[in-house]
Image: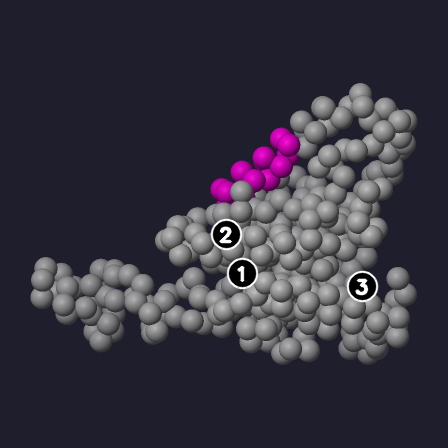
Amino acid sequence: MAQAPKLKGGGYTPDPETLAKIGRLDLKARGLVEGFLAGMHRSPYLGSSVEFAQHRGYVPGDDLKHLDWKVWGKSERYVIRQYRAETNLVAWVLVDSSASMDYTGPKAAADQSKLDWARLAAAAIGWMVLLQSDAVGLCTFAGDVQEFVPRSSRKDHLGRMCDALLRAEADPRTGIGPVLTKAAERITSRGIVVLISDLFVDTADLAKGLARFRHDGHDVLVVQVLDDELHFPFEGQVQFHGLELDQKILLNPRQIKAAYLDELQKHINAIDAACRKAGADHVLASTSSPVDVVLSAYFNKRAALSSAGARGAIGR
């Protein structure tokens, strides 16, 4: 991909080819979102107006105007009325651009890599948030943070996000633990954090990063996107070349398929367990599944559980 010329102050001017790619990604994201997005969101955080949520015990220093005198009249207990407010949402999308994400399987639709899928998913989420006049920010990373796009609620912010997504280059390094910690230090506004990665990482490092986000009060969604790894459809003698390790090995896939798929499932289960422990949602996606189908299924399930009064992580 051609690099845009650098300008003073860390900015740049995209060349015509890059601008065309940004436009295509922008239009794709808008089209996907308009297909399934409807209605307003509700903040998961407690505010001071709009809709009653729950009672809690009075604590000295609480504003007396929120005392529920009806409850006091019946039980002589002092309780405070809490409300659920419709507040401005802040979403942060973190996209893994390590070398393994640049893999495109032989049976991939339209030569779409995992990174291509992640780019479109990130752009779609960004447009969905902006469409509601909320704010969204972006971080691309591999062995370190590559780009950090500050949050904004401007509609033209999607173009900036798409630009950064397209400039994310595959990097053979992976360091998800330190990267998530660095990202968390720069994300000062509590909101929703969406991590999109194939998660071929150490689960202990991932768990530490997720725990940091949860400690900071964020809702966390982890989208694990995989390609041929899910089915291992290779046949005949195949030479496998490591994307993040410079190694090659010649194998008969049929001899190792069962063992490979078993190890992969163990890893997915470990990722799922780490997400559960951190209170994060975990969604397993395939590049063969359209982005809008994966996202709409997740949000519909979350909305259904919210309506039913369920709490905790979903998506498994």
x and y percentages locating residue 303 in the rendered image? 47, 57
* Residue on which disc 3 sits: 167
Against 277, residue 168 (above or below) is below
Mark 3 residue type: Arg
Number of other residues with Cα within 10 Å of mark 3, as a class: few under 14, some 14 to 19, many 20 or more: some
x and y percentages locating residue 150 in the rendered image? 64, 70
User: Which image quadrant: the N terminus?
Assistant: bottom right
Mark 2 residue type: Lys
**SS class of the residue under badge 3?**
helix
Q: CA distance from mark 3 to mark 2?
A: 33 Å
Q: Let me know if residue 276 is in the magenta part.
A: yes
Q: Choose the circle earlier in sequence order: 3 or 1.
A: 3
Question: Residue at 56% of width from left, 46% of height from top?
Answer: 282
* Residue 175 seen in the figure: no
Q: Is residue 246 left or right of residue 264?
A: right
x and y percentages locating residue 285 in the rendered image? 65, 46
Q: Are marks 3 and 1 in contact (CB under 8 Å)?
A: no
**SS class of the residue under badge 1?**
strand
Number of other residues with Cα within 10 Å of mark 1, as a class: few under 14, some 14 to 19, many 20 or more: some
x and y percentages locating residue 3 in the rendered image? 88, 67
Dominant secondary structure, magenta: helix
State which quadrant residue 149 falls in: bottom right
* Residue on which disc 1 sits: 192
Mark 1 residue type: Ile
Single out the mark in the foreground, 3 or 2.
2
Mark sitting on residue 301: 2
